[in-house]
Image: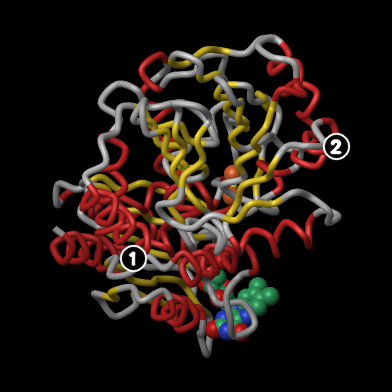
Amino acid sequence: MKAVEIIKDVYWVGGIDYDVRNFHGYSYTTHHGTTYNAYLITGEKTALIDAVYGPFSDEMFRRISSVVSTDEIQYVISNHAEMDHSGAVPEVLDRVKNATLVCTARATDVLKKHYPDGWNIQTVKTGEEVDLGGKTLRFYEAPMLHWPESMFTYYVEEEMLLPNDAFGQHYATEKRFSDEVDQNVLWREAEKYYANILWPLSRMVQRKIEEVVELGLPIKTIAPSHGLIWRKDPLQIVTRYLEWAKGERINSKVVITWDTMWQSTTKIARAIASGVNDEGLTPLLHLIPHSDRSDIMADLLEARGILVGCPTLHNDILPTVAPILSDLEVLKPVGKKCAAFGSYGWGGGSVKRIQESMERGKMDIVLEPFVLKWVPTDDELTKAYEYGREFARKVK
Ligand SMILES: Cc1cc2nc3c(=O)[nH]c(=O)nc-3n(C[C@H](O)[C@H](O)[C@H](O)COP(=O)(O)O)c2cc1C
Ligand SMILES: [Fe+2]
Ligand SMILES: [Fe+2]
């Protein structure tokens, strides 16, 4: 296991996790695994920028050792205290007793609660620098991108931005650069990452990007903490983030997601899909138990809207639908056009519950819910089809 020199004297020394299939307590599936990217900058003084998740520390040390002896590390830069990047930091500082840990003031508290105290810590604020001997690392605090203590490191001379979890993708591969891999997987993983981690933070994403643009920092390379490094037209991912943050990147898709007990709600979903399709939009159908909710949210990021369906069970929704509603509430697809549908037997209740979640997510409910009793008649299915057309016209 060797380091990969990505530009002169900057080495990727991370870990490749081919096996991980979920992140953040199963809130997020990682079909393509991930990488934990750590970077080594060698020179008069040597710095390690971020580390790997604990179980990958051996892999990281092997890669570091292929370039320098570990005890040559003088600075350990911790951009983000989350364990997938800080897990191996205690071991580094244990091996290199004199190294200085560089992080934001807020990170000291976070790190202290994760690991035993006693490190040599240098806190930095936006604009402060560390000189590695003609190689300058400048720091930019990036609170809530995506934790309060997060920061970006900028390698001035090489115009390289190391933004940790921003601009990443969960994609395990032997390749290190975004231009070397399957572009569909790359962008899908970038989109899924944004939808499931950054969507609720969109206002902060927008502000931070505008701030960096105003600074006029030249950027030749963006080296995130997960997945591939952006070297070819690196600003394309920044532009994409801005579009996602502003909700400006909209395709012709409509997400239709539901669950059912006895297929009535499925019949409604299919009729609605047919109507959406006949208005020239593309319905994406997700029967909830068959689909992963983090994939559904990834589909929703650029979609025109979403229809959520559920029959009534005990005056409420099916438990399988609750996770999607939770996602709508916490990921907050602000302004996304939406509506609810479902079958019921007597008092109903499911669509009301769905609408409450849509309201909590600050979404835009464009139609009254589509509901019917028990099994749909042909006439009711025609109405469901018309409802789909109407929804499509509202979101076009
Ligand atoms: C266990 C159970 C509980 C139900 N609870 C309610 C209820 O509280 N209120 C209601 O209006 N319908 C209730 N229903 C009726 C269903 O909503 C109705 O059968 C509906 O057509 C099912 O739609 P589906 O075929 O999409 O599963 C319940 C049905 C079952 C099986
Ligand atoms: Fe993180
Ligand atoms: Fe991370």
Local secondary structure at mark 1: helix
N-terminal of the two: label 2 or label 1? Answer: 2
Residue, x 45% and y 13% (percent of image)? 8
Residue 98 visible within the image: yes
Compared across the picture, whether 136 is left or right of 240 comes to: right
Check disc 1: other Cα within 10 Å, few if <14, some if 14-19, many if 20+: few
Which residue occupies the foreground of this view, 3 or 135? Answer: 135
Relative to residue 264, is residue 53 drawn left or right?
right
In the image, 259: left or right of 90? left
Ligand 2 within 8 A of label 1's CB? Answer: no
Q: Can residue 34 be seen in this view?
A: no
Instruction: Judge left or right: residue 340 versus residue 36.
Output: left
Give the quarter of the figure containing the N terminus: top right
Q: Which amino acid does label 1 sit on?
A: Arg
Identify the residue at image location x=78%, y=62%: 113
Count residues near mark 2 (Cα–Cα under 10 Å), then give few for <14, some for 14-19, many for 20+: few
Tell me the tag on residue 94.
2
> Which residue appears at 46% of the width and 64% of the height?
331
> 181 or 7, which lies in front?
7
Q: Quadrant of residue 229?
A: top left
Residue ID for mark 1: 203
Q: Work out whether 164 lies above or below 184.
A: below
Q: Residue at x 69, y 9 (%)?
A: 66
Q: Position of residue 364 (x, y in %)?
A: 28, 74
User: Quick one: 114 or 244, which is closer to the camera?
Assistant: 114
Dots 2, 1 in contact, CB < 8 A: no
In x, y percent, where is residue 14?
64, 25
Point out residue 219 in the picture as x, y percentages from the top left corner: 29, 33
Report x, y in % for residue 302.
Answer: 29, 49
- Inter-mark Cα distance, 2 to 1: 39 Å
